[in-house]
Amino acid sequence: MTCKKNEWLKFYSSDQEEIAFPLATIEGAKPGPTVTITAGIHGAEYPGIVSAIRLFKQLAPEKVAGKIQIVTISSLKAFESRSMFVCPVDGKNPNRFFPGDKNGSYTQVLAYHLFNDVILKGDYYLDLHGGDMVEALEPFSIYHKSGNEKIDQKSLEITKYYGLKNIISTTLTGSWPDYGTTYANASEHGIPAAIVEAGGIGQLDEESVNLHMKGLYNVLRYLGCLEGEPVVPENLTFYDEFVWVYTPKKGIFYTKVKVGDEVSKNKCVGIIEDYFGNKIEEILSPINGKVLFLTTSPAVKENGLLMGLGGQPCKN
Ligand SMILES: [Zn+2]
């Protein structure tokens, strides 16, 4: 039976605070896989959120094979309070706490239910992001190499068909960019997955929404949920290294690069000044790479994140 429905999944944190997910589901007319889409894991990354909602509005169940389940805003409290990266209830970044802990704090319980009650019920998984309020970025996707060749190949294919120009693969290192993330945990549990990023600096820009929409439709065609031949995207660059650059000191950050710039190892990519204008730190690039995201706010904390670099391009 075909249907299109919206519902609220409700759970409670250990101190009885309500955790609610807006879940939109499309049951297709024909058999097919279950595809899970989450947006708003970071509540201020709007292009992903709006694309997820738009997809739900546009899809007609009669034209869908299988099931598409969409959590349109995963970290709802963060969205409602315009909180960057973290959930305001406990100050935790959900994308560091998967697969979650049902006895943990608010964000850990949220991650637990999102993972167990939604993501693990699907066959494939896409996590839509869009650059937070102080984050400019080049559109990029990441998939995780779990070591299971079949799963990893499928994750790579999904990532390719999404069509964002920069593709990074990661392996588990026990720390970011894999540890605790949605997509890495999904693929470690046998679900081909990718995180897809287009957007930035708190904007809801149509160009980024279009990138997401194009990617979503193409992946759904590739997976056989929608009719039509998927387009094989061209001009993709693959990286097997994703290096994050931090400032050792707090202060005022002046960047020397833009997103998309190629940088060479030891090139000065930014400086940090104190509050009297004295240079206190020169930030050097640790690798040859491309600037995939950049912190746009000059206010940086000690050990604050400045940028992410895609390492030496590789073949895939
Ligand atoms: Zn994000």
Image (cartoon, rainbow, N blue to C red):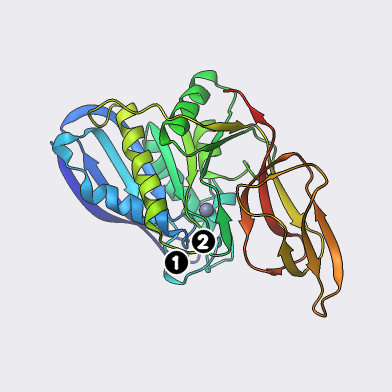
Which residue position holds label 1? 77
Quadrant housing residue 145: top right
User: Which quadrant is home to the C terminus?
Assistant: top right
Above or below — where is 152 with respect to 25? above
State the image coordinates of residue 263 (x, y, percent, origin top left).
Answer: 72, 44
Which residue position holds label 2? 106
* For residue 75, side relative to residue 178 (left or right): left
Above or below — where is 127 with respect to 72? above
| Type of amino acid at the residue the image marks with label 2 | Tyr
Are discs 2 and 1 less than 8 Å apart at CB?
yes
State the image coordinates of residue 171 (x, y, percent, origin top left).
Answer: 64, 32
- Residue lying furthest bottom: 276
* For residue 211, side relative to residue 301 (left or right): left
Q: Is residue 103 visible?
A: no
In three-dimensional space, the C-alpha distance between marks 2 and 1, rounded to whole angstroms, equals: 11 Å
- In this view of the protein, which residue sits in the foreground, 271 or 57? 271
State the image coordinates of residue 231 (x, y, percent, origin top left).
Answer: 35, 28
